[in-house]
């Protein structure tokens, strides 16, 4: 054997760096084989390519540095904010104030604290997904089985095709309450969704640019309107809740929670981030602070201007009661509609990516409706058709807007419950996993409190179970996905 062999420990001409590299390589191959054979050692990078190692050390893997990602940390904050913002940023603060009174600020702070464990759950889901196209589905598949995993994309599609058009119509009604429109609110909702679809058909970069400008304008307008409306207050500021009003905090959190729904969308677009490991948790928390800060600001301003706030138009009424209210109120209502647009821009792309990824595996759509490239254009067109159907229903029964929003919320609760259950089965009950037990209890209370409006969520769950179970097995007799036994992840 030549003396230059890197595996001879007694060779004088041996290169230390080559020896270290060879040792690491053999250790990696051994542990990877054990992980695949026994389903253990799940903390190891099983799918790390061989070229992740080079002489003198290891290079960062693709799971850490995403070379194809185009979202910087600032851009990711914009997308995170756009994922949760909507007409609720203008409507929900008044509803919380009307229901909770002096405890409204405490409600928002408590809601923000409740969201942090969920954000950490989504972060861990992304980091441990191994680059999966749908990290939530990957996590549920590992924790609850392949059938439950296949249910996730279908549930998301069914909630978005109902919730997004309904949210757009709600924002249009908010604007119609201040500005007389020459056309029905549904027509404005069509325009908003059309812009979101067109921007995403052009590409993810165009959508991100629109979101950046829109998010900046939304924050600026709301802060200016709040500052002007706070001048010459008509009532004293009430920040400290009365002891008798503390009982209203849990019910107020049920309302406030829906203003911050949407961080799960970041698990779908995490591939667009340049560094998901570094950025996901950071940008999500920053977006949460920004959104809750705006909600608290609008709550305080409404409390200063009005003795009793209307649960829907309270913020706009407070702006109208201030200096220049006749000019600022329509602008704020327009911002509510703009918030719907930002929400639609983020959700159309995220849901289309989920739809395309699931259809490639034969779960939802036939293969011929799947785009050949990475851009999910055909999936976006399919979503557009579903949006039209929902808008047609709302044009015939406009009084069902609140009912459809509550029904979509029930589906979100069920999706979150599945994700939390899978998370708890994959991790020991410590740290963030233990905190999510509390979140799970609150979710169940919210589902029970929705009454008959939760029927749609139960129906969606049943339909998804049938499609992901018997129907999928009939269409795909040889299921390539083996059942994953749950195991604790350190």
Image (cartoon, grey):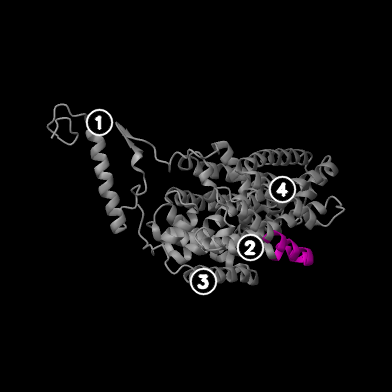
Q: In terms of sequence position, does the residue under pointer 3 or pointer 2 come before the other?
A: 2
* Helix, strand or loop under label 3: helix
**Residue highlighted by disc 4:** 195
Can the viewer see residue 440? yes
Q: Position of residue 239 (x, y in %)?
A: 65, 47
For marks 1 and 2, give the one nearer the viewer.
1
Q: In terms of sequence position, does the residue under pointer 1 or pointer 2 come before the other?
A: 1
Q: In terms of sequence position, does the residue under pointer 4 or pointer 2 come before the other?
A: 4
| Marker disc for residue 471 | 3
Marks 4 and 1: in contact by CB < 8 Å?
Answer: no
User: Compared to 218, does 449 lie above or below?
Assistant: below
Which residue is found at the position 60% from the left and 60% from the top?
157
Q: Position of residue 119 (x, y in %)?
A: 51, 50
Which region is colored magenta?
386-403
In the image, residue 390 lies in the stretch drawn in magenta: yes
* Helix, strand or loop under label 1: helix
Q: In terms of sequence position, does the residue under pointer 1 or pointer 3 come before the other?
A: 1
How far apart are the two marked residues, 1 and 3, measured between alpha carbons?
54 Å
Which residue is found at the position 36% from the left and 54% from the top?
489
Marks 2 and 4: in contact by CB < 8 Å?
Answer: no
**Residue highlighted by disc 1:** 17
The quadrant of the rendering that contains the N terminus is: top left
How far apart are the two marked residues, 1 and 4, measured between alpha carbons?
56 Å
User: Compared to 308, does 483 lie above or below?
Assistant: below
Asked whether 21 or 83 is in front, the reply is 21
Q: Residue furthest top?
A: 13
| Marker disc for residue 270 | none
Asked whether 166 or 220 is in front, the reply is 166
Can the viewer see residue 248? no
How far apart are the two marked residues, 4 and 3, measured between alpha carbons?
35 Å
* Helix, strand or loop under label 2: helix
């Amino acid at each position: 054997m030549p003396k230059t062999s890197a595996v001879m420990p007694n060779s004088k001409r041996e290169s230390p760096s080559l020896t270290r590299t060879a040792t690491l390589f053999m250790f990696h191959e051994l542990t990877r084989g054990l992980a695949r054979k026994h389903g253990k050692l799940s903390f190891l990078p099983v799918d790390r390519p061989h070229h992740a190692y080079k002489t003198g050390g290891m290079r960062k893997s693709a799971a850490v540095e995403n070379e194809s990602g185009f979202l910087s940390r600032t851009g990711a904050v914009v997308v995170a904010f756009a994922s949760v913002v909507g007409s609720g940023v203008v409507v929900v603060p008044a509803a919380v104030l009307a229901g909770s009174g002096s405890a409204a600020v405490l409600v928002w702070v408590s809601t923000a604290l409740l969201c942090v464990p969920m954000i950490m759950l989504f972060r861990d889901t992304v980091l441990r997904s191994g680059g999966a196209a749908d990290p939530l589905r990957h996590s549920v598949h590992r924790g609850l089985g392949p059938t439950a995993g296949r249910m996730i994309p279908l549930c998301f599609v069914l909630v978005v095709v109902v919730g997004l058009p309904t949210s757009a119509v709600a924002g249009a009604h908010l604007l119609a309450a201040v500005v007389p429109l020459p056309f029905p609110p549904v027509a404005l909702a069509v325009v908003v969704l059309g812009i979101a679809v067109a921007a995403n058909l052009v590409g993810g970069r165009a959508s991100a640019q629109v979101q950046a400008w829109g998010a900046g304008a939304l924050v600026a307008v709301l802060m200016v309107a709040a500052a002007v409306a706070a001048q010459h207050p008509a009532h004293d500021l009430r920040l400290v809740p009365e002891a008798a009003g503390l009982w209203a905090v849990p019910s107020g959190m049920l309302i406030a929670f829906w203003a911050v729904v949407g961080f799960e969308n970041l698990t779908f677009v995490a591939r667009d981030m340049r560094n998901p490991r570094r950025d996901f948790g950071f940008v999500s928390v920053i977006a949460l602070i920004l959104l809750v800060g705006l909600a608290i600001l609008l709550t305080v301003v409404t409390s200063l201007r009005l003795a009793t706030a209307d649960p829907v138009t309270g913020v706009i009424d407070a702006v109208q009661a201030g200096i220049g209210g006749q000019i600022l109120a329509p602008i704020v209502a327009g911002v509510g509609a703009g918030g719907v647009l930002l929400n639609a821009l983020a959700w159309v792309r995220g849901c289309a990516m989920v739809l395309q990824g699931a259809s490639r595996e034969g779960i939802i759509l036939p293969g011929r409706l799947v785009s050949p490239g990475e851009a999910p254009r055909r999936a976006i067109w399919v979503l557009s058709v579903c949006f039209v159907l929902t808008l047609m229903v709302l044009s015939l029964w406009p009084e069902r807007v609140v009912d459809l929003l509550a029904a979509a919320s029930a589906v979100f609760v069920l999706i979150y419950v599945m994700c939390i259950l899978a998370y708890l089965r994959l991790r020991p009950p410590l740290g963030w996993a233990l905190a999510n037990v509390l979140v799970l209890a609150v979710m169940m209370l919210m589902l029970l409190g929705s009454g008959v409006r939760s029927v749609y969520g139960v129906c969606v769950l049943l339909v998804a179970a049938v499609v992901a179970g018997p129907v999928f097995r009939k269409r795909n007799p040889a299921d390539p996905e083996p059942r994953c036994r749950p195991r604790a992840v350190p």
